[in-house]
Image (cartoon, rainbow, N blue to C red):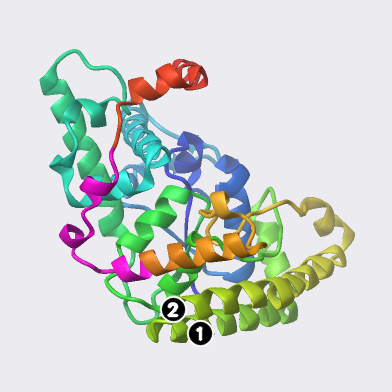
């Protein structure tokens, strides 16, 4: 299994260390967990860097002790990119389909509403410019994501927003998009839980866990292949129920076997590797983190059906801007004082 991994893109430190010899220096939480898992499953994990970020990270150099060396221009450019991505994340948190509508129909929301998720601006002209900057940033991210090319890698990220945008980049149903569709619809795919402080430790663990890793990947590939066949046949309920059953009954067991093997590694390496909680591939199903209960299963099937039917569909037929409204961020702050404090602290 070939994996394309991405951090959330809004964390300054993770982007600063992205091209360095030890990417783990800048990762935390979901980004740290998802990268460690990616490297445990694929020794040659690829790093996702959309155009504007790649242009900046190419200019970063590193000292002998792996510390990034940057100048004022790099800091300015990187700050601007993370500023825009954080605003896009706020829009996604307000309404994920509104972000998709903004991607396909940039003019469907007023500029003052869109710009409010980035800050407060003095003139309408500034709001229009910020609106356009956010749209451009959004398109650069989606245009950089892989489509359904032969042998395309599976996309793994700790970012819910990127997981959703990945589906918008897919021109058709594939094995790769099937895994993302299942996760988005609420199936928390079981993964080995691992964290590390240096990439060399992950490389050592990769070499020593071959049998357990291959058993895990064989089960995961079986689930994806069978679910893909069901989705191609239009049987969304069967795809969801099959995947949910085998994730709970078989894949979780294979993940536990990987973790048990990790505990048996030599003591020095075992101490540097830790077991941590991780939420799925990618972790974009937080609102549906459990598949237990008939109502949850039915909700997941409905979400899977909607996503499959809209895959590669012309955005006009989806009427996104008519169905998913976007309110001003200032209105959300008035309703939730904690948001106002969060904006002040940034």
Residue 281 part of the magenta-drawn span: no
Q: Residues within 10 Å of mark 2 (few under 14, many from 20)?
A: many
Q: Secondary structure at mark 1?
A: helix
Q: Residue 187 bears which disc, if any?
A: none
Q: Position of residue 345 (x, y in %)?
A: 49, 17
Task: Specify the principal SS of the magenta part.
Answer: helix
The answer to the question of whether label 1 and label 2 lie on touching residues, with beta carbons closer than 8 A, is yes
Residue that badge 1 annotates: 225
Q: Is residue 259 above or below residue 246?
A: above
Q: Secondary structure at mark 2?
A: helix
Q: Nearer the viewer, residue 263 or 306?
A: 306
Residue that badge 2 annotates: 175
Residue 309 part of the magenta-drawn span: yes
Q: Is residue 22 visible?
A: no
Q: Magenta residues? A: 307-325
The image quadrant that residue 245 belongs to is bottom right
């Amino acid at each position: 299994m070939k994996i394309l991994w991405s951090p959330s893109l809004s964390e300054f430190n993770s982007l600063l260390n992205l091209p360095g010899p030890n990417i783990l220096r800048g990762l935390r939480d979901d980004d740290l967990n998802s990268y460690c898992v990616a490297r445990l499953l694929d020794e040659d994990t690829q790093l996702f860097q959309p155009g504007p970020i790649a242009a900046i990270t190419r200019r970063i150099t590193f000292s002998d002790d792996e510390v990034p060396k940057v100048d004022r221009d790099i800091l300015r450019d990187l700050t601007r990119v993370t500023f825009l991505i954080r605003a896009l994340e706020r829009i996604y948190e307000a309404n994920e389909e509104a972000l998709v509508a903004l991607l396909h129909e940039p003019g469907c929301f007023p500029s003052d509403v869109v710009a409010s998720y980035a800050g407060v601006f003095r003139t309408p002209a500034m709001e229009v410019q910020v609106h356009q900057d956010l749209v451009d940033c959004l398109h650069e991210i989606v245009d950089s994501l892989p489509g359904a090319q032969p042998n395309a890698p599976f996309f793994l990220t700790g970012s819910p927003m990127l997981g959703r945008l990945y589906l918008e980049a897919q021109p058709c149903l594939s094995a790769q998009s099937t895994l993302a569709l299942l996760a988005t619809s609420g199936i928390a795919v079981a993964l080995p839980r691992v964290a590390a402080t240096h990439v060399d430790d992950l490389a050592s663990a990769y070499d020593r866990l071959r049998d357990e890793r291959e058993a895990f990947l064989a089960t995961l590939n079986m689930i994806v292949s069978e679910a893909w066949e069901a989705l191609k046949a239009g049987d969304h309920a069967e795809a969801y129920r099959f995947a949910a059953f085998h994730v709970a009954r078989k894949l979780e067991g294979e993940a536990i076997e990987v973790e048990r093997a990790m505990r048996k590694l030599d003591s020095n390496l075992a101490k540097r590797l830790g077991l941590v909680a991780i939420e799925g591939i990618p972790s974009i199903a937080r609102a549906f983190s459990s598949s237990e209960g008939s109502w949850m299963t039915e909700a997941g099937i409905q979400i899977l059906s909607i996503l499959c039917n809209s895959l590669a569909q012309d955005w006009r037929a989806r009427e996104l801007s008519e169905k998913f409204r976007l309110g001003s961020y200032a209105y959300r702050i008035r309703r939730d004082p904690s948001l106002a404090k969060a904006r002040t602290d940034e």
